[in-house]
Amino acid sequence: MTSPLHSKNMPAHIAIIMDGNGRWAKARHKPRVFGHQEGVKTVRKIVEYASEVGVKCLTLYSFSTENWSRPKAEISALFALLRRYVSDDLKTLHQRGVRIRILGSRKNLNDDMLALLDKVEDTTRNNTKFYLNIAFNYGGRDEILRAAEAYAKDVSVGVENVGSLDETKFSGYLDTDGLPSPDLVIRTSGEYRISNFLLWQAAYAEFIFTDVLWPDFSEKDFDNAINVYYGRERRFGAVNPAEVA
């Protein structure tokens, strides 16, 4: 395959469902937490690489609203890893011009975690070189419900009028307000589902599923996904004129 690094058609926004940490650890007879720790190393690698090759926006699915059903010890470990990632990497990411946005609900999060998320967003708010979105305590259905509730509240106080809602306006109530829709969604670990991720935003995204477990996901795997993307014809519901008789 040819290298995608200098293509004019580089997807502006790539979203990744990072899956397979637990299975990666199990295959090595290690606890699931070990897999998550290795997964964080992959996050660092892919964030840096994506920004280098010209991707403008990267969204990573780190913890879903459904993940609360996991064992408490694993949830605590995941939260601890997020805190460590922020404490170790925030300064560097800020210096590199990365803006970090946290997508998801603030419900069920303690005050320390809320303060941490606010710090991340406030510190990097004015950066524009690269946009990193962390979907944390995130669910696509929950996001749409929160947006609908916010719009209804604006209607109730006279800010909006019933009947004035369209797709553009509704998008402004979502967590991704101001961001482009994802061009490409990648899911690792061989699963073929979107797991409640960016349900509104990914309506016309290209999806690529790979058997590679997230801790093993490399720059080469990233390139391979982009090359597959280049082979897709994006029609957005239209018909290729060449196919019209």
Image (cartoon, rainbow, N blue to C red):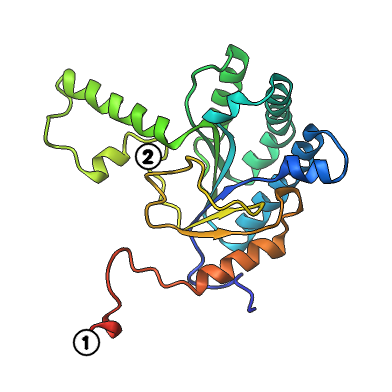
Q: Quadrant of the C terminus?
A: bottom left
Identify the residue at horizontal 17%, vertical 19% (top origin): 156
Identify the residue at horizontal 74%, vertical 37% (top origin): 36
At mark 2, the secondary structure is loop
Q: Nearer the viewer, residue 127 or 181?
A: 181
Among the 4 quarters of the image, the one containing residue 234? bottom left
Query: Where does label 2 land, which residue?
Result: 177
Query: Where does label 1 land, which residue?
Result: 245
At mark 1, the secondary structure is loop
Residue 82: image location, x then y, percent: 68, 30
Q: What's under tag 2, amino acid-wise?
A: Asp
Identify the residue at horizontal 69%, vertical 19% (top origin): 72
Looking at marks 2 and 1 on the same chain, the residue that comes earlier in the sequence is marked by 2
Tally the numbered discs. 2
Question: Is disc 2 in contact with disc 1, using a CB cutoff of under 8 Å?
Answer: no
Q: Nearer the viewer, mark 2 or mark 1?
A: 1
Identify the residue at horizontal 63%, vertical 59% (top origin): 210
User: Could you tell whether 130 is left or right of 37 in the image?
Assistant: left
Residue 19: image location, x then y, percent: 65, 45
User: Could you tell whether 106 is left or right of 93 in the image?
Assistant: left
Among the 4 quarters of the image, the one containing residue 76? top right
Q: Nearer the viewer, residue 168 or 203?
A: 203
Residue 169: image location, x then y, percent: 24, 40
User: Could you tell whether 81 is left or right of 226 in the image?
Assistant: right
Residue 178: image location, x then y, percent: 38, 43
Q: Mark 1: give few (<14), some (14-19) or many (20+) Cα within 10 Å.
A: few
Q: Mark 2: give few (<14), some (14-19) or many (20+) Cα within 10 Å.
A: few
Q: Quadrant of the N terminus?
A: bottom right
Q: Nearer the viewer, residue 176 or 205?
A: 205
Q: What's under tag 1, amino acid-wise?
A: Ala
CA distance separating discs 2 and 1 = 40 Å
What is the residue that sits farthest to the right in this orientation?
29
